[in-house]
Image (tube, rainbow, N blue to C red):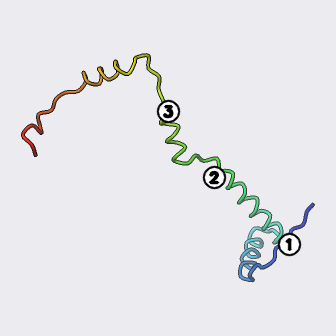
Amino acid sequence: MANLQIKGISSEFYDQIKDMAEAENRSVSQQVLYLIKEHMAKGKAVKAIKTPAQVLLELAGSWSDARDAEEIVMELKKGRSNSKKLSAGF
């Protein structure tokens, strides 16, 4: 089993870890190991979540159509209706 030594921890931070360990009936070493494992598990879960950009790219896929471009354009033009709302201007 490997050993880990951490240097430069402030006394306030160490006291917080010690208080957490006491509250959960663990040693300081057990508490630090628990916190590290918990943090790493959360990191894996966060990485598994898709970013908004990834979701958008999945939604914005392409489609296939047997018609050529001219047929599609003609269908779009047929579906349009002329509006007379702006014929008199603004």
Q: Amino acid at mark 1?
A: Gln
* Residue tagged 3: 61
Q: State which quarter of the image contains the N terminus.
A: bottom right
Q: Amino acid at mark 2?
A: Val
Q: Residues within 10 Å of mark 3 (few under 14, many from 20)?
A: few
Q: Residues within 10 Å of mark 2 (few under 14, many from 20)?
A: few
* Residue tagged 2: 46
Which residue sits at x=74%, y=74%? 17
Which residue sits at x=47%, y=36%? 60
Which residue sits at x=9%, y=43%? 89
Residue 18 in picture, x, y percent from top left: 77, 76
Please tell me whether mark 3 sits on a helix, a strand or a loop.
loop
The residue furthest left is: 88
Q: Nearer the viewer, residue 10 or 38?
A: 10
* Residue tagged 1: 5
* Sequence-first tag of 1 and 3: 1
Which residue sits at x=49%, y=33%? 61
* Sequence-first tag of 1 and 2: 1
Labels 3 & 2 near each other (Cβ < 8 A): no
State the CA–CA distance, disc 1 to disc 2. 28 Å
Please tell me whether mark 1 sits on a helix, a strand or a loop.
loop
Q: Nearer the viewer, residue 38 or 89?
A: 89
State the CA–CA distance, disc 1 to disc 3. 51 Å
The residue furthest top is: 66
